[in-house]
Amino acid sequence: MAVVVLALALAACGKLTMENFNRVKVGMSFDEVTNLIGRPERCSEALTVRTCEWGDDKRRAGVSFVSDKVILMSADNLR
């Protein structure tokens, strides 16, 4: 079981690259984004905005969604 969890975690990290992040565009759906950069580590919701984050303290990406569509993106230290 631990091997499966580790494999999934490594696969998700492998998708979080600057090349893949640059493919994320305003108007994309949550599913389209997760197909490009993997499942987020965490999401929060405030009012009608869902903000999700990928990565860790050293390299991260953030995407905000309204009505399941990208409205804002940011990234730090992706390669």
Image (cartoon, grey):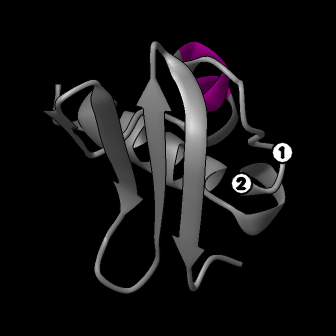
Q: Residue at x 77, y 50 (%)?
A: 20
Answer with the quarter of the image where residue 43 lies. top left
Residue 71: percent from the left, percent from the top?
A: 58, 39
Residue stretch rendered in magenta on the structure: 31-35
Numbered disc 2: secondary structure: helix
Q: Are marks 1 and 2 in contact (CB under 8 Å)?
A: yes
- How packed is label 2: few (under 14 Cα within 10 Å), some, or many (20 or more)? many
Task: Pick the quarter of the image with the C terminus.
Answer: bottom right
Give the overall secondary structure of the magenta segment: helix
| Amino acid type for the residue under numbered disc 2 | Phe
Q: CA distance from mark 1 to mark 2?
A: 5 Å
User: In the drawing, does residue 17 fall left or right of residue 56?
Assistant: right
Q: Position of residue 54 (x, y in %)?
A: 40, 54
Q: Which residue is mark 2?
A: 21
Amino acid at dot 1: Arg
Judging depth in this view, the residue of 50 and 18 nearest the camera is 50
For disc 1, the marked residue is 23
Which quarter of the figure is the N terminus placed in?
A: top left
- Magenta stretch: residue 1 in it? no
Q: Number of callouts in the render?
A: 2
| Residue visible at 72% across and 37% down in the picture | 26
Looking at the rendered structure, the secondary structure element under dot 1 is: loop
Residue 65 is situated, as x and y percent measured from the top left of the image, at: 46, 31
